[in-house]
Image (tube, grey):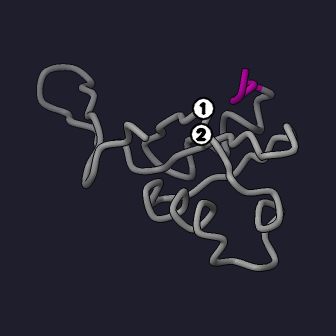
Amino acid sequence: MGVSKGYPRSGFLGKKEKIILEFYVYMLRCRDLSYYTGHTDNIEARIGQHEQGSIKTCYTYTKRPVYVVYVAEFASRGVLRKLRMNGIPLLG
């Protein structure tokens, strides 16, 4: 899948202020060619849940296998919320 375990990449603001990216938005392509978007703070575990069908009420449960087509990392859920509130597209 290509997603690193533990902390993903980190970015820097200025010289000393380090940001750890720890929130993700993702898009999956399903067997029927439909798409599912979601967000999580543990991308590996969440993708695994989709692949294994461990959440029976999830849209992807009957549409497996699923394929990861997009993953974006954010510093926090708050950053993601601000982007959405300002109308910034997160996918595509």
Q: Name the image quarter holding residue 58.
A: bottom right
Q: Secondary structure at mark 2?
A: strand
Residue at position x 47%, y 54% from top?
Answer: 43
Which mark, residue 68?
2
On screen, residue 51 above or below 31:
below
Dominant secondary structure of the residues highlighted in magenta in the image: loop
Q: Say what amino acid the circle numbered 1 marks.
A: Tyr
Q: Name the image quarter holding residue 28.
A: top right
| Residue neighbourhood size for the residue with mark 1, other residues' Cα within 10 Å, grouped as few (<14), some (14–19), many (≥20) | few
Residue 66 location in percent, x, y?
Answer: 67, 49
Per the image, the residue denoted by label 1 is 70
The reply, left or right, for residue 29 in relation to residue 20 is: right
**Residue found at the far left of this picture:** 16
Residue 32 location in percent, x, y?
Answer: 87, 44
Q: Label 2 to label 1, Cα distance in Å? A: 6 Å
Residue at position x 54%, y 36% from top?
Answer: 71
Q: Is residue 89 magenta?
A: yes
Residue 21 location in percent, x, y?
Answer: 36, 42
Q: What span is colored magenta in the figure?
A: 88-92
Instruction: Classify the position of the C terminus by image quarter.
Output: top right
